[in-house]
Amino acid sequence: MAKDNNQEQQQMQISLSPEVAKGVYSNFQIVSHAPTEFVIDFANMLPGQPQAQVNSRIIMTPQVAKRLLGALNENIQRYEKEFGRITEPGGNMPPRTIAPFGTPKGDA
């Protein structure tokens, strides 16, 4: 007799404090990596300001970064199906990343 997969799955409980629930706006991200981790800095770039202000830094393993990429791809597809294609100003610009720490040399 086969068991229903829904019965076997446990629901994950997630706690969200009011302070974290407010969120932090980011319109600029810096992605860098080393052999053992990915670092994503979330920042704001304001018009007329000479530098971006980093609001949050997330450090994750390569495996978690790959799962995040998959989750973002899936959610972008769902969004575009419901609301239409997301376009970027300036046409089809390739994605860019900035490595503020230079090129990794294999040391973490």
Image: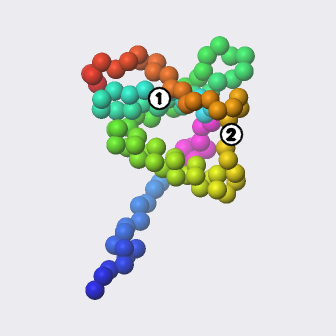
Q: Please give left or right for residue 15 compared with residue 84 in the image.
A: left
Give the amino acid at mark 1: Val
Q: Residues within 10 Å of mark 1 (few under 14, many from 20)?
A: some
Q: Quadrant of residue 45?
A: top right
Rendered residue at 40%/40% (across/down):
65
Q: Residue furthest top?
A: 50
Which residue is under mark 1? 31
Q: Is residue 82 magenta?
A: no
Which residue is under mark 2? 87
Find the distance from the CA under tag 1 to the CA under tag 2: 21 Å
Q: Is residue 55 visible?
A: no
Q: Nearer the viewer, residue 95 or 24?
A: 95
Is residue 33 depicted above or below 10 in this figure?
Answer: above
Give the amino acid at mark 2: Thr
Check the picture and name the quadrant holding the C terminus. Answer: top left
| Residues in magenta, as a range | 16-25
**What secondary structure is marked by label 2?**
loop
| Pair 1/2: label in front | 2
Q: Is residue 20 magenta?
A: yes
Q: Residue furthest bottom?
A: 1
Q: Position of residue 6 (x, y in %)?
A: 40, 74
Q: Position of residue 23 (x, y in %)?
A: 59, 42
Determine contact: label 1, label 2, CB under 8 Å.
no
Q: Position of residue 94 (x, y in %)?
A: 57, 30
Check the picture and name the quadrant holding the N terminus. Answer: bottom left
Q: Residue furthest front?
A: 92
Rendered residue at 61%/16% (across/down):
51
Type of secondary structure dominating the magenta stretch: loop
Rendered residue at 34%/27% (across/down):
34
Q: Is residue 64 visible?
A: yes
